[in-house]
Amino acid sequence: MEQLPTLLACTQEQLAAILAEAGETKSYRVTQLAEWIWKKGATNFEQMSNLPPTLRRTLTERYTLRPLAVTERRVSVGGTRKLLCRLQDGELVETVIIPAALGENGSQSQRLTLCISSQVGCSFGCKFCASGLHGLKRSLSVGEIIGQIAVAQDEADDRVDNLVFMGMGEPLDNLENLLPALRLIIDPHALGISPRHITISTSGNVPGLKKLAQCGLPVRLAVSLHGATDEVRSRIMPVNRKWPLSELLSALEEWRAGSKHMITLEYILIAGVNDMLPQADLLADIARRLRAKINLIPCNPVPNLDWQRPAESVCRAFCRSLLAHHVPVTMRYEKGADIDAACGQLRRRTIERQ
Ligand code: SF4
């Protein structure tokens, strides 16, 4: 794929500058171009029928509207659709479309949800996750982050209106590109997705969390907790050795003070590792301290990773124990196990085939 910059990363002011550079100074052209990009979902400049042919040709030579292309699609029996996308430099990222009927956390929802990647690979190495197995290749650019939304909308022939940054990579390790991407995503003149329908998921990157809090973007936060003591959490999340629970929880308290949304604590249940009832008691203490909700996810086995799903009775007992502490809990079973929908699995299989 020829490497061209994408207009998906551009603000209105930047579009105006690009048009001026292409010799077009009429101010209404900016509105026309922005409408084609954001409202009509144009995939190439030739579709922009109200722009002069010479301008369309110039833009085609200099820019792209799709900085990534779908190379593989998997559709699960439940309708979850995983896209494997090739970037202009040949790297691969995964994006998952979750149909409206399922919605976030498996609840009933009319929203079209997209689980989006922020990096190629990941350096955080969480033990249940295939994305970190090959390490971090690079962070995604603003255009590549937004490009995932554009190709998902092409595929679904519908607008994405709920966004979860839970795909490959640690979003807070790529704040440089995440923040401008978020601004375009929520901008009513660009994608216009409400910030309360955007969830950033972090493994517990404390400095990134503090910087995100300072930006004051009213997005939701999910935290991969997976252990209620340093000993248990460090076995699952190497990041905990760098930023232990005490530091993470005080950063989350600060976040909570500045946000009206509840934090979601993600907790993957792993047999014999973190599914003991004393962990449930401590987890409930943490949730109460943060006024957070808990999302339990019985683990899906990942090939070559040594974790197993607990018995159903153990998952239920863990959930009951949390409910006895009067903290909000949901139990979510990962959708799309039949299509390698868990983070990083499809990319990993594809790399191994190459
Ligand atoms: S869970 Fe997220 S932060 Fe952890 S290794 Fe996977 S992609 Fe990275």
Image (cartoon, rainbow, N blue to C red):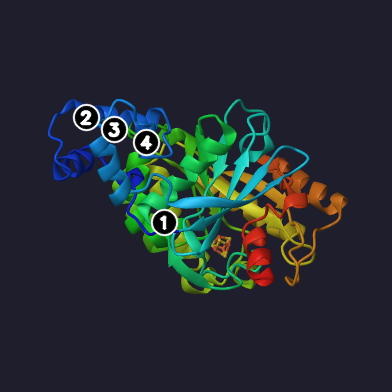
Looking at the image, tell me whether mark 4 or mark 2 is earlier in sequence order. 2
Mark 2 lies on residue: 29
Alpha-carbon span between mark 4 and mark 1: 49 Å
- Residue 227, percent across and down? 63, 62
Identify the element where label 3 is drawn.
Answer: helix
Looking at the image, tell me whether mark 3 or mark 1 is earlier in sequence order. 3
> Could you tell me which residue is drawn at 52 percent across and 67 percent down?
122
Mark 4 lies on residue: 46
Quarter of the image for the N terminus: give it: bottom left
Q: Dots 3 and 2: beta carbons under 8 Å?
A: yes
Binning the other alpha carbons within 10 Å of mark 1 as few (below 14), some (14 to 19) or many (20 upward) gives many
Q: Left or right: 181 with respect to 107?
A: left
Q: Nearer the viewer, mark 4 or mark 2?
A: 4
Looking at the image, tell me whether mark 4 or mark 1 is earlier in sequence order. 4
The amino acid at mark 1 is: Ala
Q: Quadrant of ligand 1?
A: bottom right
The amino acid at mark 4 is: Glu
- Residue 138, percent across and down? 44, 67
Alpha-carbon span between mark 3 and mark 2: 6 Å
> Could you tell me which residue is drawn at 50 percent across and 32 percent down?
161
Q: Is residue 217 visible?
A: no
Identify the element where label 1 is drawn.
Answer: helix
Q: Dots 3 and 1: beta carbons under 8 Å?
A: no
Q: Which mark is residue 251?
A: 1
Mark 3 lies on residue: 33
Quarter of the image for the C terminus: give it: bottom right
Q: Left or right: 216 with respect to 261?
A: left
